[in-house]
Amino acid sequence: MSSPTPTLLAERMANVRHRRQERRPVESNVPKSRLITWEPSEEFIKNSHIINTPVQTMYIMGDLGPSGKLGLKENEYVLCTIKSDSNGVITIKPDFNNNRGAYRLETQGEKREVWRLYLENASSHIHAEEKEREQRMYRDLYTRHKEYLNSLVGQDFEMPPLGILRLIVNGEIVSAQGYEYDNLYVHFFLDLPNNWSSVPFHCLSGVTQTCRTHSVGKDVAFFSYPFSFETFFHKEDESDGSLPQWPVMFFKVLSLDFWQRYRTEGYGFLVIPSTPGYHRMTCHTWRPLQSGTVAELRRFFIGGAPELEDISYVRVPGTFKVTHYTFPAVKICTCISSNSI
């Protein structure tokens, strides 16, 4: 029996280093500055915000006091606010009723009263020439805004060559839950089947940050780690009408102990969806389990665990080509299938 040939993914995995067992202080060149101003002053708000257009404000108020108690300040209420800016735009709040129900205004004090407020536009209607000129101004404004947006986006879009399928994946590793130990992090790899290729010098693997678990019903580690892949598929035989095999993402979940030693917590894989759009997926993982108390003590005190030399063996590897199958009667390992990322 010949030894199995390592796949390309296994060779790339050999170059991915595990977490360092010793932590060294990293000198940061980021200047220390106050990122958040909890109590901003009015001058700070005016200088920091984008829109700072001078506005004139007028309040229409009403004395809603009972008969015989008019002129008291506590009985004055704002009925309407009118604002006019330097661009000639007039804003009224609340808006005109326009044959809708009245606004309700409830007074404060010993005798609560409810007033019904109607706001109507009593200005004379504009002439047809002025209305047409206003509509032309709006159309010209919308046209210039559309041209401005087109100048930002552009008209020429990059298209893949003829006969090549371009696949772009923008994803996020959200969380992991149900694992035995804390301080989790995830190694992930993208395996490309035959006739698939990637952008030169584009990394198809990565590792998340180390995250502690939080009790949200279950112990959950929230990563929110983004990743992005860009791949291409080229069909050599144009007469073959079969659909291509889609890339597969492999995951390896690990944990760190107090001495910065890692333990394997689970292996899993997900096939990249073949339909465009948003997908939310859950990957169930497993790991080789050594039975016995000695193995658990070794895993707790020393770290480490049985690992797969080739992570593609979580799924049917690409080099697995046989015409018949034989199933031995010896059970090599058991699996834990209750974990997911």
Image: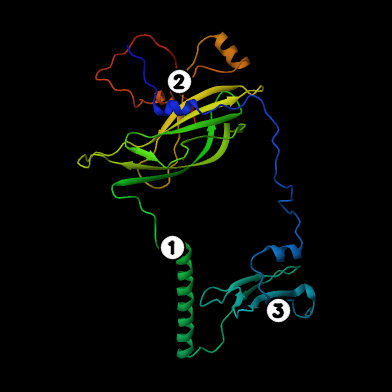
Residue 217 visible here: no
Q: Nearer the viewer, residue 51 or 162?
A: 162
Q: Of the numbered discs in the image, which one, if any, rests on residue 62? A: 3
| Residue shown at the point (30%, 38%) measured from the top left | 244
| In the rendered image, the vertical position of residue 300 relative to residue 119, given as above or below | above
**Tag 2–tag 1 contact (CB < 8 Å):** no
Q: Is residue 35 left or right of residue 223?
A: right
Q: CA distance from mark 2 to mark 3?
A: 82 Å
Q: Amino acid at mark 1?
A: Gly
Badge nearest the viewer, 2 or 3: 2
**Within the image, what quadrant is residue 293 found in?**
top right
Q: Which residue is mark 1?
A: 154
| Residue shown at the point (71%, 52%) measured from the top left | 36
SS for dot 2: loop
**Tag 3–tag 1 contact (CB < 8 Å):** no
User: Residue reaching furthest left?
Assistant: 239
Q: Nearer the viewer, residue 112 or 71?
A: 71
Q: CA distance from mark 3 to mark 1?
A: 54 Å
Q: Which residue is mark 2?
A: 309
